Structure formats: C-alpha cells, structure tokens
Amino acid sequence: MQRTASAADFNAAQRFFRRASSLLWRRPRVAATVLLAPPMLWFVLIYLAALGILFLSAFWTVDDFTGEIVHQWTLINFETLATSETYRAIAGRTLGIAALVTLTDIVLAFPCAYFMARIAGPRLRATLFVVMLLPIWLSYVARVYAWRLILAHDGVLNWTLHQLGLPAADIGYTNTAMWLVFSYIWLPFMITPIYAAIERVPGSLFEASADLGAKGLRTFVKVTLPLVVPGIIAGSIFTFSLTMGDYITPILIGGPGSSFIGNVVYSNVGIANDIPFAAAFATIPAVVMVAYLFAARRLGAFEMM
Amino acid sequence: MESTFTKWALGIWTALVIVFLFVPIAIIVVYAFNPSHIQTWPLPGLSTRWFPAAWHNREIRHALWLSVKAALLATGISVTLGTAAAFAVHRFKFFGREAVSFIVVLPIALPGVLTGIALNSFFGFWHIGLSYWTIVIGHATFCIVIVYNNVIARLRRISGSLREASMDLGADTFVTFRRITLPMLSTALISGALLAFALSLDEVIVTTFTAGAQNTLPLWIFGAIRLGQRLPEVNVVVTVVMLATLIPVILAYRLMNRAPADTGK
Amino acid sequence: MKATRSQITSAVAGGMAAVLLTLGVAASAAPVKANYPDKIGKGEGQLNLVAWEGYAQDEWVKPFEKQTGCMVHRKYAGSSDEMVALMRQGGGGEYDLVSASGDASLRLIYGGDVQPVDVKLIPAWQDFLPQLKSPPNNTVNGLHYGVSYEWGPNVLLYNTNKVTPKPTSWDAIYSDAYKGQVTVPDNPIQIADAALYLKAHKPELGIKDPYELTRKQLAAAVDLLQKQRPLIKKYWAQASDEIELFKNGDAVVGAAWPYMTNALQKDGVSVADTIPAEGATGWSDTWMLSAHAKHPNCAYKWMQYVSTPKVQAEQAIYFGETPANKEACSAMDKIEKGACHKFHLDAPSSYFDQIYFWKTPRTQCADGQRNCTSYRDWQRAWQRVKG
C-alpha cells in the first residue's frame, strides 16, 4: 500500500520535473527568471535598499542633545563637508594614500606575477600561487597588529637596525607606516589578477615579437603591458577600494593626522551616532568607486577578477 | 624571450616579496610562544602556556563557534544565489544582463565601511535587532560575488556542445545538469565555497556594523588587541586558526588549477 | 539648582518631542516612565554589559556568574560617545546595562534609552555617599535612572625616568618639552581639559565651567589643542593604547586614568601620576538599565552585586578610583592596607567638589543663556583638532 503510494508520488514527481524541464527548455524567459529572481531580490531588497536608505539619510540631520535622527530634508551635512578644511584634508589623504598604495602594489606585484606566469615551471608556479595568496586567509587584524609590534619605538625594526649599527627609524604611528601596512595587506589582491592577465597572453606573441627583433623592454612595453592592463585595473579595484574603505589600520597604525574617511564614518556611526553625517561623507568613496567601476568594465577588467 | 639576468632579477624580486609577506606572520607565530604577556622584543624566552589558556577561554570558544556558524550559512546562501546568477547571465540574453554582473560586484568593490553602515542603518530603519542573522546577511551579500565569479569563469570554459549532445540524447534539463554540468562545475563550486567561507570567517569591517553585542572571532581578536590584556592568546588563536585554514586553502587552489581548462581553448 | 536644571531639560525635551510629533514623525526622544518590578525574579541566564575597560574583570564577574547563573557578556567601550552609540545599536536592547559617565547619562535618559531603576531593590544604595544617591547626572524628576558606581579624577601620567622633575602643571602636555612623546585621549571631552588649563592660564577668557564654553572660549581651547597636535605621538582610543605606548617607549607623558598607572606599574614600567595645579576633570559613573533590556532580572542582580562594599572595593583598587558606597572603606583596607585613604574614600566632600566631573556640553549655559556650544560643536571641533 505504502509502496504504491510512494511509487505514484515518484512518478508524479518525475512527470512534474519532465514538464518543468521542457517548459524551461522551451521558455528561456521563464528559466532566466527562475534563476535570476532569488539573487536579484536579495540584492535589490537588502543591499540596494540599504544603500538607498543610507543615501536618503545623508539629507537628514541629528538632534544636538539626544542624538536622535530628525527626518527633515536638509543639505547641512554636505555644506559642512564642502566648507570644512578638515574634511577636505581627510578625503584628500584617503584618496591619496589609496592611490599610492595601488601604485606600490602594482610595482611590487608585477614582477612576481610575471615570474609566476612566464618563468616558473608548473610545480613552482602552483606552489608560489598558494604561498602568495596564503596571507589573505590569515587574520587581517592580527597581521596589521604585527606591524605595530614591528614599527614601535622599541620594536623589531629598530632592534634589527640597532644590531646592524644603523640609526633608529621613527615611523611608528605615522602616515608612512599606514602606507607600508596597506601596501602589505592588499598586495595579494594585486598579484592574482595580474597573473591571470599575463597567463592569458599567448606565449607565441612574445616569441613573434622577439623574432621580429623587438628587444626585451620594447616587447614588454608594446606587447605585454597593453594586454596586462585589464588585470592591473582589476587588481587596482581591490587595492584602491579596500584601502579607501578601511578604518582599522588607521586606528591601529596611524598617529595624529591619520584619520581616513572610514574613521570619520565609523566614529560618526559607532561613536557620535550621527548616521546622516556619516552617510554624507560616505558618498564620496561611493561615487569615486562607481565611476572607477564603469571605467574598469569598459577596459575589460571584470573578466580578470 | 627573457634573458638569464631578467629571470634571476625577477626570481629574486619574487623571493623578497615573499619575505615581506611572511615576516609579520612569523612575528605572530613567535609571539604565541611569549612567556610574558608584555609584548617586548626580543622575547624573554619561550613558553607554551598560552595555548591551554586560550583553549579554556569561553569568549574565544563562543566567538569561534559563532564565526563558523555564520560562515557556513553565508557560504550556503552565496553558493545557491551566486550559482543561479552565474547560470542566468551565462545562458540567457536578457535586458539588464550587464547590470547584473555590475550589481553583484558592488558589495566587494564599494568600500567596506559603506556596506557596513548601509546595512546598519537599514536594519535600524526596519527595527531589526542585530543578531546572528544580520551577520549572515552581511556576509552572504559580499560572498555571492566570489562564487559568482568562480562559476561564471568555469561556465565560459565549458563548451556548450557537451550539454547540447546530452539534451539531444534525450536527457532533460535536470538530468543534464546533474550528469554533465554539475560534475564539470564541482571544482569551481568547491573552491568558490571555500574562498567564500574563508572570507566570511575573517571579515571584520562590515561585521562590526552588523554583529551587535556578539563577537565573531575577528571581532574578538580586534577587541582583544585594542584592550591589550590577552595579546598572547590572540597570537595563539591566530596561529592555530592559520594552521587549520592552511589545508582547505591549499586544497581550494589545487582544485582551481586542475580545471577542465582544455575543453575551452 | 538641581530642580531648575532638570525642569529646563525636560521642558526642552518635551518641546522637541512635540515639534517632532506635529511633523508626524515617530520619535521616542523623551525620558522613559518608571515600570518597576515588584521583586527581582529568576535570572535569565545572561547579561550583556557595556562598560569602561576594567569595569567587568573576572575577579568579580566570575563569582557573580557562579552566584546568579547569569553569564556576563561584556563590551568595553573607549569613550562615552561609544557607550551611547552601543546602547542605541539596532534600536536598543542589545545590551542590558551600561556604566555611563556623567557626560553620557543625561543623553541616554533624554534619548529614552534607559529606564528608571527602583533603588529599594538595591539595599546597599542606602550606604552611598550623600552626593551620589540622587546626583543630577542620573536622577531626573526624582526618578533614578541607575545607581552610582565609582568616581575619580583624570590624571597626568608620566615616565619617572624620562620626565624629571615631577611635573606639577598640565604644561607637560602643552609645551614642547616632550615633543612627539605625548599622548592624550581621542575624545571630544578632552576639550574640557584644555579649557581647564586656559581657565588657570588665561583668566581674560572668563571660563567658569570647562563644559560651558562660548564660541570664543571653544575657539581658544581648539587653538591650544591644535598647537598641541605636533607634540602628540598618538591620540589613544582605548586605555590599552596608552599602556602600550608607555611600555614601548613611544610616549613618556600623557593624560590618563589611574587605571593605566596601576597596569603599567604592575608590569614593571616606571611611571607615576599626579593631579596638576590647574585641577582635573573626572568622571562619576552610573550603572544604567536599558529601556529595552532583555535580561532585567540579571541586570538588577548585577546592580545589587556591584553596589556591595566588597565589589566596590575590588573595583576601586583595580581601577584606581573611589567607590560610591562609603561602607567599602574597611573592605578596601582589607585588600590593601591604607587603600581607603589612598583612594580618597575617607576624604572630606571638598575633595569631591574640586573635580570637574564630565557632563554633556549643551547650548544652554548655566545662567540660562543659549550662547554656549553644544556637544556636536565639540565633536566637530575635535575632528578639526586631530585632523
């Protein structure tokens, strides 16, 4: 009795699946909708809605004494930002260091990626790949903190310099320290896309160019570099955006005059409870990044991510 | 082709970069054996006494368990949604297809602090208390892209002809999916899932804004570092977690490299 | 004075609420009404605290957990602002109790974030110093929004090897004698410290209360702090930042709490602290109960527990501050001989009165005029200072 029932169930289920299958096959529109609806609903109902609310709240303000949000349209937050020397300086510092970190990482990563893709044998390449990317999976906060131990006045760096008879370096709690640590933390994110881009350049292209008499450097500039640009851009999306949106490294590594946009945002949300002002300030990196992404997609960087 | 000199120069450069990458990590490991809780250099000696201390710390256990739970669910969600989105974008042509790949990338391309406060004020707006679920929502949002990227890259490599052959032989969409597409995708899915899991496990910028009163492991580490009283235990935890992640990460990369790449080219 | 001030503030809050309501906007910005439990029920098994670093140490948390079955989850905050934000996170209710200082407590009360506490359920309250039974920073219209805890002054901390002779003025952190080796809190309320210094050194500014500054006075304090910035190694956000800076030789002098002095001395760093001639700002803390507390019984048990002489004494000696419960004196002496005197619990009330306790700066000055600067002005000014 039971068996027949379940067999019937099974048949019904099978028929259902068959029908669904042929429906999906004949009606690609239905299939696309079925596949696309859940992820898109997730993004639209949660993520984009959240960004939308945030953007709206940039036009609200906060009661001076109780700190509750006052839902009244105002441009006061943007006015404060535009007229204040301090916030301009912070935005400039954030974007400047993010750009510098990106450049540094390109310089550091390119030779490594090139070595991995073109010179190392398959075994060494696989090993290098794992080794270079391993740090990403280790606690980010702890790695930043390790630098604090290295750069402190009586830290590892100065101890080493002292052993070598060199004068002490006093870079703990400075913007230089932040540049160094950011470049360190995000370096692996630059190596992978550049590697992927170089790997895609067919070896025959290099040989053809060499056969035609192009010297090493010219081959590099004329052939390799243009083909690798999308990879570099893909990597720079990560290094630039990750640096720009950080607030932990400035807290742990920075000194006086090291505040980032992220710190102002964090302290306005987590400390001063002034979400509208934080939202207004956060529109700067958002606008910069969206523009950057549009440009990056035109250059084909999305394929490399 | 590159001259011997270039090869050597590049090799040495690569070696130096590796040293740069691993010195701070070595410092963490060394400090895990610091007998004193004061962080001075050089160490006054070596000791393993912080290992049992960390093991018996209730807060660490709680934080670790919460992190693992959140990462598991976030990974599950992002595998489901990321794969679905990748299939839709790869298989079908529809209006706004380009926009999909753009939207999916946004959560990792936009600065983390922005995603963080956006979600924070979103939950506040709807009076949703911060909890395990809000952590998962935050993590899944930026993990989807990891799976999406992995799957779509693999789909581009798999040729469509195999699938069509299967359909011609009478297999329906689901059978084809199970017998043909899924096996070819499996390594991309596994590696994508592992990467998403690891990303979720270590996330701190967004989590700060979505966790409320609870501590995930990275939040505990951040708090402990700032409070300074449990630094040796932090180093122990990081060292142990590092060893534990080593195996799945290496596995993930091996899977990614050993892909059915030949079919595509 | 007490009455007028609370009347004014409640009038302001009431007016504000009215304005918001007429705009048709939901706002909860008013003090919460009393809703006392008849007695303290069974513990809920958990308690979430927001506290100052060092306020929920295992030494007294573990016995509490064992005694009540309430497992304590603590979040240490570095500033009053952070405490207020944490108590409001996710619509409130994430945390049950907060150890708010005077510059946060009124904001929490008028923000509707905390609820009145029935002091009858906390027997030890009877033994509190008279000034701390119903102080204006936690008692509004006769309702107690929490129970006072501990209090103390902000001190000048210095490395005894590097800073000689012993500093007697806050000059030590404003003059360039220790350029690049100074650390001060990353906290807008630090402006009051600068104002206190100016009160003594620039009487022509006419500063009376360091928390009630006109625009001109605020500008002068900001100017002093901006001149101080090149001297700073790091603005510390957490007590441990400063401890680490002193341990690693990065800083030799700074503004601190006695807690740092204790911690550093315990670790063998040669430091000492002092209250300089200009006087000092300070704190008076209150355990406040969240309006949306999920574990009210455990919260009441905690307030009962930490008000007892023994815990008050342990806390005082650990952190380097003074208990609210005067019966804690003998308990303190039992832990450390002479501690009661050392931490001023037996001091005359003039000692209490000479500390400028933290409070939230508001546009309304004490004389009723509205030309003072608000806390938001201070926050913005502080961002200008640290850059």
Image (cartoon, helix red, strand yellow):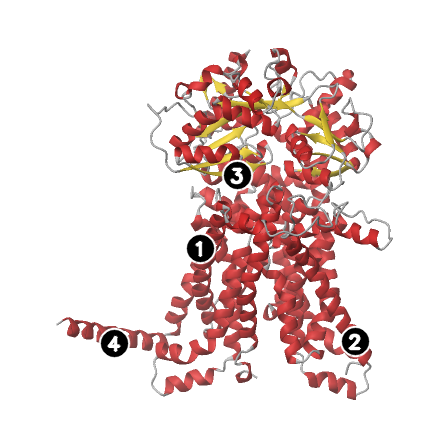
In this figure, which residue is indicated by the disc labeled 2?
Answer: B8
Judged by depth in the image, the label closer to the viewer, 3 or 4, is: 3
Q: Are marks 4 and 2 on the same chain?
A: no
Q: Residues within 10 Å of mark 2 (few under 14, many from 20)?
A: some
**Residue A61 image-quadrant placement:** top right
Q: Are marks 3 and 4 on the same chain?
A: no
In this figure, which residue is indicated by the disc labeled 1?
Answer: B69
Q: Are marks 4 and 1 on the same chain?
A: no
Ranked by sequence position, the earlier of labels 2 and 1 is 2
What is the spatial separation of the Cα atoms under label 4 and label 2, in whole angstroms?
A: 65 Å
Badge 3: chain ID:
C
Provide residue C313's location: percent of width, then percent of height.
Answer: 54, 24
Q: Secondary structure at mark 2?
A: helix
What is the spatial separation of the Cα atoms under label 3 and label 4, in whole angstroms?
A: 57 Å
What is the spatial separation of the Cα atoms under label 2 and label 3, in whole angstroms?
A: 52 Å
Task: Check disc 1 and give the amino acid type.
Answer: Lys
Q: Secondary structure at mark 1?
A: helix
Where residue C75 is drawn, which disc sits there? 3
Task: Check disc 2 and give the amino acid type.
Answer: Trp
| Location of residue C206 with respect to A255 vertically, above or below | above
Q: Are marks 1 and 3 on the same chain?
A: no
In this figure, which residue is indicated by the disc labeled 4?
Answer: A15
What is the spatial separation of the Cα atoms under label 2 and label 1, in whole angstroms?
A: 46 Å
Could you tell me which residue is drawn at 76 percent across and 69 percent down? Answer: B13
* C68 to the left or right of B252: left
- Give the total of numbered labels: 4
| Location of residue A212 with respect to A169 vertically, above or below | below
Q: Residues within 10 Å of mark 3 (few under 14, many from 20)?
A: many
Provide residue A80's location: percent of width, then percent of height.
Answer: 65, 38
Image quadrant in which the C terminus of chain B is located = bottom right
